[in-house]
Image (cartoon, rainbow, N blue to C red):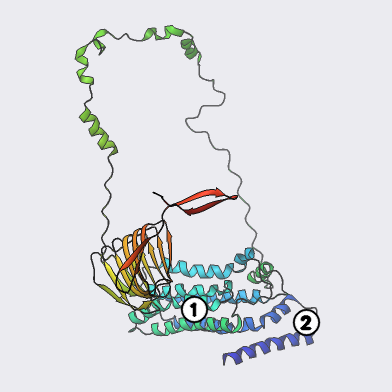
Amino acid sequence: MSNLESLVSRLEAVTTRLEKCASGRGAPSSAADDDDEYDTSEYVTEFQETLDKADALVKASENLPSDVLEMSKMLKVVCEKNKEFLRVSVRAKAPVPADVPAVIKPLNDAISEIGQYRDKNRPSKQFNHLSAVSEAVPAFGWVCVAPRPLDYMSEMIGAADFYLNRVLKDFKEIPGHKEWCAAVRAVFTALKQYVADHQKKGVNWNPNGEAATAVAAKIYSGAGAPPPPPAAPRAPAPPPPGPPAPPSGAKPKGAAPPDTSGLFAELNKGAAITSGLRKVTDKEKTHKNPELRGSSVVKDGDLNKNKKAAVGPAKSAAPVKKPPRLENVNFGKKWECEYQVGNHNIVIDVKPTQSLYIFKCEDSIITVKGKLNSVTLDNCKKCAVIVDTLIASMDVVNCTSCKLQVNDRAPTVSIDKTDGCQVFVQRATGLGTEFVTAKSSEVNICLVEENGEYTESFVAEQFRTFFKDGKFVTELYEVVG
């Protein structure tokens, strides 16, 4: 049905053009006629369905709180700015990278305003409504993504599902909110469908068009619209103020400079200038009067006491101890294990699509059952991780005295900024594992035999660099003897 409506609108535009030509008003061709020709392009007309969905969203928001209605109207503005951009794209050739910000500026500004509005209304009870739109609206940035904008859009639109589900849960007893969530999804579904049908590999620019910046300036400024009425004449400006009055303490102009002759007379006396000073008697000299010495002695205790009071180090605040946490987040795609201390019985059942992130755990053992995508061990101390099979990699960062065991396969083990790491791999399946280390020490690889015995090999830490054959060469430094 929507395709039929789009076809009818295009036929009407062509009919209007032909009528103008028949009446003699179509020659010579004007800028308005060119606009009619370009605006009937399917790249522009097919976007109307997304605008219609935005209108439906605003209508669904009329009986909801004012901030939800305002956010819906702002999303409609984004859709309108996207259509203006499409009007530019059918007239202009692809811009150079330096001109892209100017060409997408109105659209980019409208997207940014939605994020700013969400941040200003964090205390709102409808914050999940605002967040749903704010998380999904970057999908309109597809205009800068090539050659696969749909993948980018899917990721952005999917980020809104979490907040929309919260809205459905928190407001399920209040009418109107369910319909609003459906309307939001409809807007982005229509947008994604439009891109899939007409801009699948990115924006289709006009190779024979004008410069994008010139076309954008014309479209965005509303060229062809009647000029605004002239402004009313301004009232004459008031006369300039007179010179400021001198401050009360200022000296009048022409006052005589201060007399400095007395100063130079004193300086010309030479050694006689000290004749006016009082003479110190022997009773006032500490080296001739022992009674004065006791009062001028500074004790070591007093000196050290003052030193400590002046430069004593400030006591550092004790680290905040957070409760242990083991949770499946990001719609079931990620496990997070944090702040575990002394827990040797952590068992996690995983799926191939999931990843595991372990953070600030100490003296704990984490056993992972099944195949998973990746494991990251971050800022942990004296921890052990046992996994069956990894699809991607195991990463160890900023850790101390950790142990890793791979029971089946792991393509890559990456160790960075870690002191003390022991990795156990099986001879039958682990010979293809690649180890990448950086800024780490005491890293050992243990190759486990079928009988349980293992051989241990170290990862080099020392290297030497020297100049050879016109360049610097780095090689392993071996200590002999």
Residue 455 located left or right of residue 253: left
Residue visible at 58% across and 67% down? Answer: 105
Residue visible at 50% across and 16% down? Answer: 260
Q: What separation in Å lies between label 2 and label 1 (alpha carbons)?
A: 44 Å
Q: Position of residue 317 (x, y in %)?
A: 27, 52
Q: Quadrant of residue 389?
A: bottom left
- Say what amino acid the circle numbered 1 marks: Ser
C-beta proximity under 8 Å, tags 2 and 1:
no
Residue 164 located left or right of residue 220: left
How many other residues sit within 10 Å of disc 1, few (<14), some (14-19) or many (≥20)? some
Residue visible at 31% across and 73% down? Answer: 327
Front residue of this view, candidates 26 and 39? 39
Q: Position of residue 412 (x, y in %)?
A: 43, 69
Above-or-below relation of 283 to 212: above
- Say what amino acid the circle numbered 2 marks: Gly
- Location of mark 1 (residue): 154
Q: Position of residue 354 (x, y in %)?
A: 38, 76
The first of marks 2 and 1 along the sequence is 2
Residue 228 showing in the rendered view: no
How many other residues sit within 10 Å of disc 2, few (<14), some (14-19) or many (≥20)? some
Q: Quadrant of residue 395?
A: bottom left
Q: Quadrant of residue 339?
A: bottom left
Residue 196 showing in the rendered view: yes
